[in-house]
Image (cartoon, grey):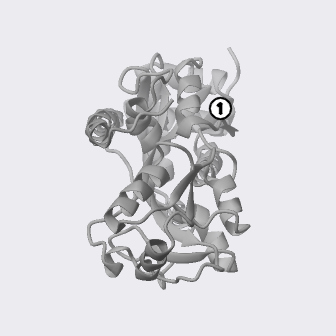
Amino acid sequence: MTSIKPSRRKWLIASASAGLCALAHTRLARGAEVVRIIVGFPPGQATDIVARLLAEQLKTVTGDNYIVDNRPGQGGSIAMGITANSPADGTVMMLTHMSAVATNPHLYKSVHYNSKNDFKAVGLVGDLPFVLVCHPSQPFTTIPELIDYAKKHPGKLTHASSGNGTVSHLAMEEFKRRAGIDVLHVPYKGSAPGLTDVVAGQVSLALETAAGVQPFVKSGQLRALATATPKRLPGMPKVPTTAEQGFADFTAATWLMLIYPARTPDTLVSSTFDALSKVMSNPEVSEKLARIGAIARTSANPQEAAAYIRSEYDSWGEVVKRSGVVLD
């Protein structure tokens, strides 16, 4: 049997004392010395940023080495398919998001996974609130000014999204519908390339995560028009909310959750949840998430996380059905 480092042994013993299976931890120590965290977007996107923070923090708890494996495409669905067919031995997990789990299976004609059956949930990590931004050269600084300009120049404005069916796409479509404006959708494989084109002035607008837009807003490369949140964000206190500008019930956010392939042993899922809980209980982690525009949120246990997936899948399925949108 492979020897276990003293620091690793202490962690295993502590977990076992909490009622977890020591055998599962031994398998994790032996077979998951390098653990891939799959992310469905390119480097630099909000989910990727959070995944890298988790990789760093989980290593301090478990002693394993975690690497982020970016597999962009189809709004995270390609990464979900890869995860579903990965080894169920603790060497592969995914930091997934709401769109990939709850909307994409209803939007796309074919995805290579079943959200309810092909995965085991570990636990929620947090929420990513969205912010509406534009290139500084645009002649508007508020939502009312944006709407006025768009109505006077129909079809002139464009907006980037992190992919068809993602929150940045669907939420912006809802905003355009409510505002009664015509803005052309330009989908990308992740928020980073889309924001790059907004910064370059090739695209007019983007409704993207605070984590993704904050560096550009602080540097003056993008102008923040509104946060799609009930209250102003701590990291962007001067930016008014959509509610403050006439859209009281309009919000946009996505959640993040760690998942495993479905065949992963429950004991391994439990041990990973234990490690994740230890990470999320660290106040410094919540502070770091807040600094990048994320809001920490956790699950009580893996069973609660699994139930949340089922609930979100069903509720968003109804939303997509009402929209009538179907993607190739």
Q: Position of residue 120 (x, y in %)?
A: 42, 26
Quadrant of residue 88 within the rendered picture:
top right
In the picture, the quarter occupied by the N terminus is top right
Tell me the crowding category of disc 1: few under 14, some 14 to 19, or many 20 or more residues within 10 angstroms, Cα based: many
Q: Is residue 167 above or below residue 288?
A: above
The foreground one among 130 and 24 is 130
Image position, residue 210 (x, y; %): 53, 65
Identify the image quadrant of residue 59: top right
Q: Nearer the viewer, residue 6 or 248?
A: 248
Q: Residue at x 58, y 83 (%)?
A: 139
Instruction: Let me know if residue 197 appears in the view.
Output: yes
Vertically, is 125 above or below 113? below
214 or 19: nearer the viewer: 214
All told, the count of numbered labels is: 1
Closer-to-camera residue (308/106): 106
Q: Is residue 193 left or right of residue 180?
A: right
For the point 37% across and 68% down, which residue is it?
229
- In the picture as drawn, the residue positioned furthest to the right comes out as 200
Determine whether 8 is above or below 167 in the image: above
The residue lying at 64 percent from left, 56 percent from top is 194
Q: Secondary structure at mark 1?
A: strand
**Horizontal and vertical percent for residue 15?**
46, 35
Vertically, is 227 above or below 245?
Answer: above
The kind of residue tagged 1 is Val
- The spot of residue 219 in percent (x, y) is 69, 78
Q: Is residue 284 visible?
A: no
Task: Please give the residue where the numbered disc 1 appears in the rendered image.
Answer: 35
